[in-house]
Image (tube, rainbow, N blue to C red):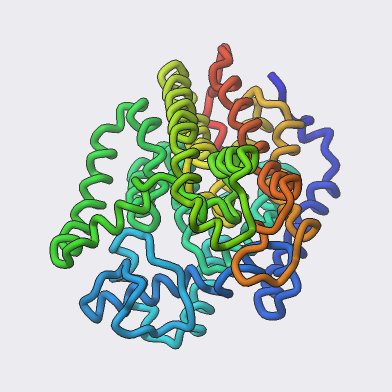
Amino acid sequence: MRRFPAPSRLKFHAGLAFLLAGVAVHILFLLSLKFGFLNPLFDDAMHRKGQGADFYAVVQAGQNFSDGVSIYTTSPRRQVVPYYYPYRYHPFVAYTFGQLFLLLPPIGAYGLWIILLEFVLIVNLVVTRKLISDERSAMVLMGIWLLFSPFYLELYLGQFSFAMASLLFWALVAWERNARRIGDSSWIVSLIVKSNSVLLTPALLKQGRWKLVAMGAGVAILLAVPYFASVPGTYQEFARNYTKPMSMPQLLGNQGFAGLIGIAILRMNGLWTDDLHELHARLDQMDRLMQTPLSVWTAVILLLTLLVTIRAQRERRTDLFLLWILSYFLFYKHVWEHHYVMLLPVFVLLYLRITTGKLNLAPGIFWGTFSIIALPTLFPLIDLSNVLFDPELYWETWKSFLYHVPKPLAVLLLYGALCLAILHKSKDPEGQQSSLVRS
């Protein structure tokens, strides 16, 4: 089996340098939240509503809840934040976090959320350190959490993806340690913090965890139905986020593979235009042109992932969980650069499993894909113009591909390599003990 060089051959100082580089970069992240010097590296920091916009959506939803109007409305009775994006989450977040954050001024609430995310990061580092006894490997694992540019956008926007990803990380570690109550609780909470974690359901069913899946669905439903029933139309607003097909405006800034396919279709068919009036006239035609290819692509990815899940050995449960997380970036319509923080648990656990010989995945593929995903996009080399709507409308086709291709292609490569590694017949796929137990 492939594995990274044995710990005895790793230089201690290399692992230490990797960790210290991560600490230094993370300090730059925090400083840039105040001074903004990293913002030019990111489209979402330069051409969107502003810092904290996703977080303010939660605060405004909390106010909407208090005012008795839809938490998903973009026409609130009272606007209490400077700007915000439409709220998309489970109602639980609005009537818990949203209500609590109303106790502070918007900027103070945003600062508190940043502190909470940093605390969660520290918890992840502590948990990660306990996964392996070798200090050099542990330093690399901790460095992975810190050397990851999408985390800056997570902080900048005040997103909830990292909180959900951390809950998934805790769940995966707990399940590998047979701490089912902790793992099950973490996964169930993740469902109501941000529903993306429903992705683990097929892999859980593979393990016979029907009761857990039913319990998770029950909790999510029970905490949502009273609100949906009391405010007519809100369920439809919530569900539309997941069921409505991709439309052209969702391609702007999109970093998913489905978004890349949409860009390729519209660019290659000559429908792309920087004339806003002409663009508006073509929107319906653009959307129709994308619908069938994207539906086929989604079906292919889901069916392939299901096939691998069915054929995999039961002992490959952690690998299957990671595979389903990767699949999100290939088929889902809403994939933005900050969403890649969801891959932090994937990279941490993949590195651990490769290092301990539990997974036959080439280190070159690991480090190559990690580097592409951890680094910012090529946006600063393409366009920094101040425009009314979005700079991508004015990009040439090659610039658009330069922006959209690297990260989704890296995910596809890692996804394919992991599929093959899962289906690889190992004599002892999990060894005599879990890979998440200190030796």
Q: Residue at x 82, y 53 (%)?
A: 17
Which quadrant, please, contains the N terminus?
top right
The image shows residue 13 at horizontal and vertical percentages of 85, 49
The image shows residue 398, relative to residue 75, as above or below, that is: above
Q: Quadrant of residue 133?
A: top right
Looking at this view, name the residue that lies furthest to the bottom.
105
The image shows residue 98, relative to residue 410, as above or below, that is: below
- Residue 436 vs residue 302, the one in the foreground: 302
Q: Residue at x 54, y 62 (%)?
A: 277
- Residue 113 vs residue 337, the one in the foreground: 337
Is residue 183 in sight in this rendering?
yes
The number of numbered badges drawn on the structure is: 0
Q: Residue at x 57, y 62 (%)?
A: 276
Name the side, left or right, on which 185 lies relative to 44.
left
The image shows residue 211 at horizontal and vertical percentages of 24, 36
- Residue 31 vs residue 294, the one in the foreground: 294
- Residue 77 vs residue 203, the one in the foreground: 77
Which quadrant, please, contains the C terminus?
top right
Is residue 346 in sight in this rendering?
no
Q: Quadrant of residue 364?
A: top right
The image shows residue 237 at horizontal and vertical percentages of 29, 59
The image shows residue 415 at horizontal and vertical percentages of 59, 31
Q: Residue at x 55, y 73 (%)?
A: 49
